[in-house]
Image (tube, helix red, strand yellow):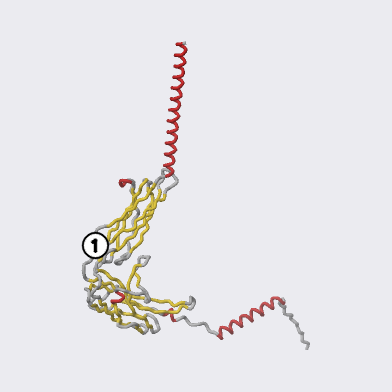
Amino acid sequence: MHVLAVSRRTPRLPVRLTVLLRAAVLGLLTALALVCAHPTPAAAADGDVSWRVRTGANAYGDDRSSFSYAVNPGGTVEDTMVVTNRGRTPLRLAVYASDGYTTDAGQLDLLTRDKKSTGVGVWTRPEVTAVTVAPGKSADVPFTVTVPENATPGDHVGGLLTSLKQADTAAGINVDRRLGLRVAVRVGGELKPRLAVEDVHLDYHGSAGPFSKGSATVTYTVHNTGNALLSGRQEVAVAGPFGWLRTAAGDLPDTPALLPGERWKVTVPVADVAPGVRLTATAKVLPLLTDASGSTTPLKPVEGSAGAWAVPWTLALLVLLLIAVVTAIVLLARRNRARRKAREAALVRDAVKAALG
């Protein structure tokens, strides 16, 4: 029996391609070895940290958005803030109070712990400086607000805060995560709600066209000179002499609620302002007082004004040129008349001499 042997030749890959494949396989095996030796880190616990704060249910109310009290000097108020851990790990938070202030964005913010408080931040004392809350659980934080005997009557605002400092490894800094509730105290005594409009300034921006209108920019400062929390409804207008050519700015938003002593700088653009040679800008603010129930009462408006020159220089140059041309024509006409009279007089003299001779 004869066996026929068949030989099959396997095609060989080019040498360069073989080297590349070997390098790729070696790299893949190395990467797998590194993964096995160093497993991927689990999700950072910081991403699971979440908590909320709310007012306690008591005689002051069951569903309040913040703490608000009316207290006479020397009086004391006791209340509770509830902290709920919404994460999956135990949470330990620092607890402290601080004064409030209005930011440049018009929002109420609270001083950080390293800044010194002089009002509500000092009057408000939590029973604990730190609280530990189990996952999914809540903890009460009782606190006391004690108003000094010499406290200034009017509105004072601060807040009660919970704080958690976390390290940001990527940025190399500590991040202070804060969550709290506003504490507003109206101290008994004479309430003097007042706003003032200060430092009004007007800038006029003319146009190259002799008969075109320009624009204006009005800047001013709203100053809370009273002792009550106030916002203001604003109106701005620019007018020429005797109130002519009056141009009002568009609808302006109300100022934020300003604490006593705070200032709010305002910049208002006004379009299509006629160049009235001498312009006057008027900024009028209607103070708005909001009481504890949320109702708003408008007070007597206050205003400030400032002036600026708005000379249409192109038109003025044209007028000056026209005056120069008219003056030149008049002078030339007078000179021509004088010359004619001189010639006529010379002719008369010559005629008289001829007659006498």
Residue drawn at the location 31% of the way across and 75% of the way down: 121
Q: Look at the picture and state if 262 lies above or below 44.
A: above
Residue drawn at the location 36% of the way across and 74% of the way down: 115
Q: Which of 149 and 13 is in front in this view?
A: 149
Residue drawn at the location 25% of the way across and 72% of the way down: 151
> What is the quadrant of residue 146 in the picture?
bottom left
Q: Name the residue under label 1.
A: 297
Q: Look at the picture and state if 155 lies above or below 52.
A: above
Residue 67 position within the rendered picture, expressed as x and y whole percent measured from the top left: 28, 74
The residue at the far bottom in this view is 1
Whether residue 270 sits left or right of residue 297 in the image: it is right
Quarter of the image for the N terminus: give it. bottom right
Q: How many labels were placed on the picture?
A: 1
Q: Which of 204 and 150 is in front in this view?
A: 150
Residue 60 position within the rendered picture, expressed as x and y whole percent measured from the top left: 23, 76
Residue drawn at the location 27% of the way across and 79% of the way down: 144
Q: Which amino acid does label 1 sit on?
A: Thr
Whether residue 25 sits left or right of residue 101 in the image: it is right
> What is the quadrant of residue 178 in the picture?
bottom left
Residue 163 position within the rendered picture, expressed as x and y whole percent measured from the top left: 37, 78
Residue 224 position within the rendered picture, expressed as x and y whole percent measured from the top left: 29, 63
